[in-house]
Image (cartoon, rainbow, N blue to C red):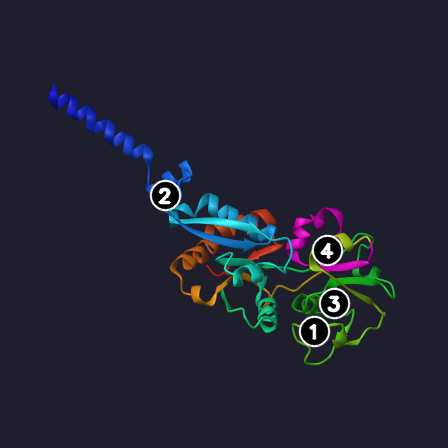
């Protein structure tokens, strides 16, 4: 009888352990994050925060991480929050944008960790169907921050709407326009407001994330896309310089480049958001 009860007890224990699963599964199922390392990440709502939420819900616990996402609706706050130690990392910007911030903020010591994805800029219009429909003197909205303005002007130049001066780089401004054959009226607007500005301009060059947030693919026509080949404007993960070699940041970076996340990006945003290195493996 004792032997029988021993077998029953051992079987019950084995069944219980199997049902419980790994510690990370327990943490995930029960909301217990006591054994996980918390990483606070600031991000734009779409696609960055959505990608991070996907990682948190599906991958983070098994990597020993608890990702807490703070969403920022403009580009002015995430680097300041990271500099002040309010968050551990941010994920919303390009290298030129980061460099612009560092050039203007000598107290900031931030470093680029890795490229994660690319969002193509688009020239959108609510009233026009083709780029050839732009009339002389048409109003074109562009982002008013230096790095994104230069990127928008390059898109216009690549489509023969204007010519930039030789040597104009990613921080080109309206002062760098050398030739404007149809007298386009270039209107700088805060990037986050560009989708709303479409009613007041003939067309606008809109950042990928803001176009996604506003669902412009449903409400506006795309007159031209930015070329994504050899494009230097990848969005990436940024941390304070003293966290550059942090093993938990390395884990987060690895998760952001996982096959699961790449598939999620491709399924959710079908070409508007391109995972970096997705074609390399």
N-term mark: 2 or 1? 2
Of callouts 3 and 2, which one flags the residue occurring earlier in the amino acid sequence? 2
Residue at label 1? 172
Q: Are marks 2 and 1 in contact (CB under 8 Å)?
A: no
Mark 3 vs mark 2: give the one in front.
Answer: 2
Q: Secondary structure at mark 4?
A: helix
Q: Closer to the camera: disc 1 or disc 4?
A: 4
Q: Which residue is mark 4?
A: 193
Left or right of 20? Residue 92 is right
Q: Position of residue 18 (x, y in %)?
A: 30, 34
Farthest right residue? 136
Residue 24 got which mark? 2
Crowdedness near tag 3: few (<14), some (14–19) or many (≥20) residues, C-alpha within 10 Å? many
Residue occupied by mark 3: 156
N-terminal of the pair, mark 2 or mark 4, is 2
Q: Secondary structure at mark 1?
A: loop
Question: Which residue is depicted at the point 33% across and 37% down?
Answer: 21
| In front of the other: 80 or 89 | 80
Q: Which circle's residue, 1 or 3, is located before the other in the chain?
A: 3
Find the magenta span and give its range: 200-221
Q: Residues within 10 Å of mark 2 (few under 14, many from 20)?
A: many
Please provide percent x and percent y for residue 107.
54, 70
Of callouts 1 and 4, the N-terminal one: 1
Check if residue 104 falls in the magenta segment: no
Which percent across, then down, holds residue 84? 52, 61
Which of labels 4 and 3 is toward the front?
4
């Amino acid at each position: 009888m004792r032997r029988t009860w021993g077998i029953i007890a051992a079987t019950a224990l084995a069944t219980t352990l199997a049902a419980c699963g790994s510690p990370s599964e327990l943490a995930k199922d029960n909301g217990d994050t006591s054994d996980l390392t918390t990483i606070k990440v600031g991000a734009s709502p779409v696609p960055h925060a959505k990608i991070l939420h996907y990682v948190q819900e599906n991958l983070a616990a098994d990597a020993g991480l608890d990702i807490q996402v703070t969403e920022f609706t403009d580009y002015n706050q995430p680097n300041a929050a990271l500099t002040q130690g309010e968050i551990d990392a941010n994920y919303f910007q390009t290298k030129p944008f980061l460099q612009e911030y560092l050039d203007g903020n000598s107290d900031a010591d931030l470093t680029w960790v890795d490229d994660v994805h690319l969002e193509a800029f688009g020239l959108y219009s609510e009233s026009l169907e083709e780029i050839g429909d732009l009339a002389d003197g048409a109003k074109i909205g562009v982002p008013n921050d230096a790095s994104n303005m230069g990127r928008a002007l390059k898109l216009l130049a690549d489509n023969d709407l204007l010519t930039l001066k030789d040597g104009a780089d990613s921080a080109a401004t309206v002062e760098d326009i050398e030739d404007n054959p149809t007298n386009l009226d270039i209107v700088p607007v805060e990037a986050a407001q560009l989708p709303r500005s479409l009613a007041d301009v003939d067309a606008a060059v809109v950042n990928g994330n803001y176009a996604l947030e506003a669902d412009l693919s449903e409400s506006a026509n795309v007159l031209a896309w930015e070329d994504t080949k050899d494009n230097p404007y990848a969005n990436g993960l940024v941390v304070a310089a003293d966290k550059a070699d942090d093993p938990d940041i390395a884990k987060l970076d690895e998760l952001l480049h996982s096959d699961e996340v790449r598939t999620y990006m491709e399924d959710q945003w079908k070409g508007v958001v391109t995972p970096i290195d997705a074609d390399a493996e």
